């Protein structure tokens, strides 16, 4: 269960940093709304970095929580390093949030199989928040996209 939690910790930290990267660098049409949207995504998942790490240590493990550890262990694709349009950043975040949302659902099922209901509940809680954020991101795509 500690390995599962550390994996989600790495992915959560990476997703948070990628949302902040988009927030800091978005330009062009719809700048303000996307700037706020990307920051809201980052803010919505930031508390779970701490919660996941504390759950790991509560269970007797060691939280693998540095940025270097997250970068090494994250399953999310690397975020674009060159400036992108707002729509390109939006699509990049949608892809990553969808991957992350699916991994949380899978982690929840794994925690249930391991008879770890508190950890299962944590993953379900994260899933609810992330699914809502994914909906908000996708709602900003052009209607025919």
Image (cartoon, rainbow, N blue to C red):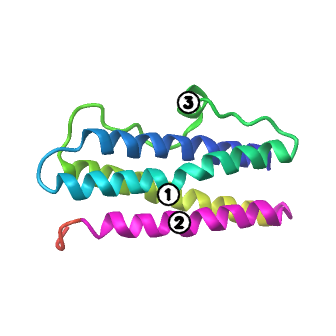
Q: Quadrant of residue 61?
A: top right
**Magenta-highlighted residues:** 113-140
Locate residue 14 relative to residue 53 in the image: left or right. left
> From this viewpoint, which residue is outermost toward the left?
29
Compute the Cα span from label 2 to label 3: 22 Å
Q: Mark 2 points at which residue?
A: 129
Residue 57, how many percent across, how many down? 81, 42
Which corner quadrant holds the C terminus? bottom left
Q: Quadrant of residue 77?
A: top left
Tell me the number on the disc at residue 67.
Answer: 3
Residue 117 belongs to magenta span:
yes
Question: Residue drawn 31% across and 43% down?
Answer: 22
Compute the Cα span from label 3 to label 1: 18 Å
Q: Are marks 2 and 3 in contact (CB under 8 Å)?
A: no
Residue 45, how many percent across, how many down? 53, 54
Compute the Cα span from label 2 to label 1: 7 Å
Whether residue 91 is situated above or below residue 118 in the rendered picture: above
Mark 2 crowdedness (10 Å alpha carbons): few <14, some 14-19, many ≥20: some
Dot 3: element: helix
Tell me the number on the disc at residue 44.
Answer: 1
């Amino acid at each position: 269960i500690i390995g599962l939690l550390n994996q989600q910790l790495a992915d959560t930290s990476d997703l948070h940093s990628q949302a902040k990267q988009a927030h800091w660098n978005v330009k062009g049409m719809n700048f303000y709304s996307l700037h706020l949207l990307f920051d809201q995504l980052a803010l919505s998942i930031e508390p779970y970095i701490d919660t996941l790490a504390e759950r790991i240590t509560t269970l007797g493990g060691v939280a693998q929580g540095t940025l270097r550890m997250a970068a090494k262990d994250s399953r999310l694709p690397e975020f674009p390093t060159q400036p992108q349009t707002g729509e390109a950043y939006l699509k990049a975040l949608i892809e990553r949030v969808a991957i992350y949302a699916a991994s949380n659902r899978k982690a929840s099922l794994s925690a249930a199989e391991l008879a770890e209901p508190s950890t299962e509940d944590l993953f379900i809680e994260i899933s609810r928040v992330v699914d809502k954020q994914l909906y908000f991101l996708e709602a900003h795509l052009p209607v025919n996209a």
